[in-house]
Amino acid sequence: MNSAKHLIISLLLTLLIGAIGTVGYMMIEGWNLFDSIYMTVTTISTVGYGEVHKLGKPGRIFTIVLIFVGVGFCLYVAGAMVQFMVEGRVKAILGRRRLDKRISKLKNHYIICGYGRIGKVLCGNLRSKKNFELVVIENNKDLIPAMEEDGVLFLARDAVEEDTLIRAGINTAKGLVAVLASDADNVFLVLTARQLKPDLYITARASRNEAKSKLIAAGANTVVSPYELGVISMSQRILRPAVTSFLELAYSEQGTDIKMEEIAVSESSKIINVMLKDTGIRQKYNLIIIAIKKHDGSMTFNPSSETKIQAGDTVIVVGKDENLQKLEKVLQS
């Protein structure tokens, strides 16, 4: 039985004993309700201010029984309360230490600052991808139950503090996403993160267009405005409904027919310096390569069959998920 149930049962039994004592004095001695309650409380709590009224022999015998039973249960309840408080505190400390230990071992992970509406959905989408590690920083204590329920690694601290970012593993992180409640907090966060790790890739949310330039000046690599993207998406649905439907299907995690993915090419891959027509990607995996992003950031759209894949390239490809996974093994083996 856990300590919470233990405590609840103990309190209910104490109330039951109190009720029995009150009814006993009312029936045996004929006292009124208030006097009976007062006598019961002073008896089982061992305070013993004295008898409310003179007790007869049956009343004294009843009081002796009530003392032995009631005092024992009071001690039992006190022990249950101490156990409840101590175990709860110990569990919280041990749980926090386990989280901190897991966070300290992370490498090439992402730090998500903010677990509001956008942060929560973002984390859900990112965690759906295999082997994607992330840490959430959220200062709002009301959101702790949601983070615990979702099973994310988190720090319930202020994201703009240097110590918090260090504890989140910024020195070994691959990127940081700033989705705090206000643009001012995001700007300050980006400044702090950029000072701690100059080569960190930072993505920030801007709720207003005026904040974009400030976030970029603070050091953000990418600035996204959800409201602006929403307007663009609505207009594209009207102007290019077929294209929009295709992209939604390709980006959807639930779509089983087709997906769009980007796969990095490792230095150990067997198809480095091999022309696309000789790799067999189209024939073996029934995949379409839309573009190849080179190591220097340049993009080759609709690459020709004679294009060679180099180490450090990122291949953007469309096809079925099972075939994408097979290609990922080839490119990163």
Image (spheres, grey):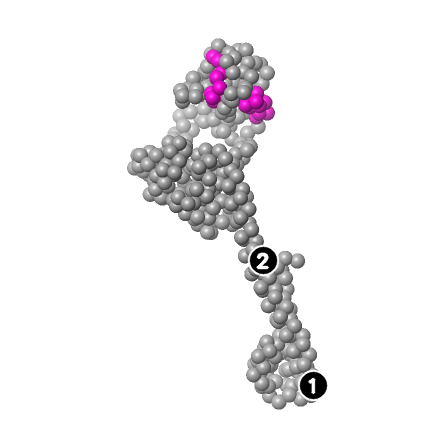
- The residue singled out by tag 2 in the image is 87
Q: Which residue shows up at 39% across the image and 31% down it? A: 199
Provide residue 213's location: percent of width, then percent of height: 30, 34
Q: Give the quarter of the image for residue 6.
A: bottom right
Report if residue 40 lies within the magenta region: no
Q: Is residue 161 left or right of residue 20?
A: left
- Residue 191 position (above or below residue 246): below
Tell me the amino acid under the disc marked 1.
Pro
Along the line of sight, which residue is nearer the eye, 166 or 42?
166
Residue 250 in view of the camera: yes
Instruction: Point out residue 227 in the picture as x, y percentages from the top left corner.
Output: 38, 37
To which residue does mark 1 refer? 58
Specify the amino acid type for callout 2: Glu
Estimate the x, y position of residue 287 in percent, counting from the top left.
54, 19
Up the image or down, 101 lies above or below 282; here it is below
Instruction: Locate the C terminus and report the quarter of the image it occupies.
Output: top right
Identified at 40% across, 39% down, the residue is 178
Along the horizontal axis of the image, is 131 left or right of 57?
A: left
The residue drawn where x is 67% and y is 85% is: 60
How far separated are the C-alphas under marks 1 and 2? 43 Å
First-in-chain label (1 vs 2):
1
Label 2: few (<14), some (14–19) or many (≥20) C-alpha neighbours in 10 Å: some
* Circle 1 SS class: helix
**Figure quadrant of residue 282:** top right
Q: Nearer the viewer, residue 305 or 170?
A: 170
Q: Quadrant of the N terminus?
A: bottom right
Q: Magenta part of the protein: which range?
A: 307-333
Q: Nearer the viewer, residue 52 or 318?
A: 52
Position of 275 relative to 316 (above/below): above
**Label 2 element class:** helix
